[in-house]
Amino acid sequence: MNKITKNIPNILTISRIIVSPLIIILWNHKVLNTIVILYCVLTDIIDGYLARKLKIATKWGGKLDSLADVFFYLSLVVLILIYEPKILINYILLIGILITRITSVIICKVRNHEIYSIHTIGNKMTGVIVILGVFLYWVLNMKMITTVVFSLATLSAIEELLIFLIIRNPDINMKSLLNND
């Protein structure tokens, strides 16, 4: 396998880090913004799939993917705070998610001497529902979808926190707290 092919998953992940802040900048350009969000979601799916399929998945690549997820979701949070403060009816859930995620990072660093997030089914489902939620919010003007999105994000954040509290050095690709295969 040549060097370029071997690095495609990490190149896709790095591109997601670079592109994610465009979500904030392009808010008023719904079509372009939707393309950027879809790009971020698709590269998040494709990078991990390629790494596993080509048998070139690495711990560093998993951490890079976690960092790209942080950039993406942080961009969405900033976008909400700047352009859609009226949906902050769910402000308490958002603050709870942020506190839980920050606590997870601290516990992960203290217990495992490194920082990463776990690719649980709950975290993956949250990613899907966030994208679906953005679409339903923008296109169909379904404002209540934010409660569903924030609720699922809260549950997946709590699950990851519990994993870091209960299991030392959990596998980055662990499916859930109840399924440690």
Image: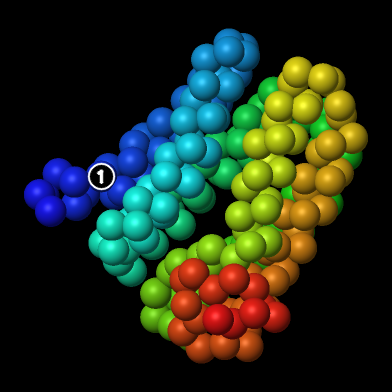
In this view, the residue farthest toward the left is 2
In the depicted view, which residue is nearer to us: 26 or 110? 26
The quarter holding residue 119 reads bottom right
Q: Classify residue 5 as left or right of residue 82.
A: left
Q: Which residue is mark 1?
A: 8
Q: Classify residue 57 as left or right of residue 165.
A: left
In the depicted view, which residue is nearer to us: 77 or 152? 152
Disc 1 residue type (three-letter): Ile
In the depicted view, which residue is nearer to us: 123 or 49? 49
Q: Residue at x 71, y 43 (%)?
A: 129
Crowding near the residue tagged with mark 1, few <14, some 14–19, many ≥20 C-alpha atoms within 10 Å? some
Give the answer, above or below, for where 116 lies relative to 14: below
Give the answer, above or below, for where 42 lies relative to 50: above
Q: Position of residue 15 (x, y in %)?
A: 34, 37
The quarter holding residue 157 reads bottom right
Q: Is residue 61 visible?
A: no
Q: Position of residue 175 (x, y in %)?
A: 59, 71
Q: Position of residue 154 (x, y in %)?
A: 76, 59
Give the answer, above or below, for where 57 lies relative to 80: below
Q: Position of residue 90 (x, y in %)?
A: 84, 44
Q: Residue at x 55, y 81 (%)?
A: 181
Q: Residue at x 47, y 30 (%)?
A: 39
Secondary structure, mark 1, is helix
Number of marks in picture: 1
The quarter holding residue 18 reads top left
Q: Classify residue 173 as left or right of residue 64.
A: right
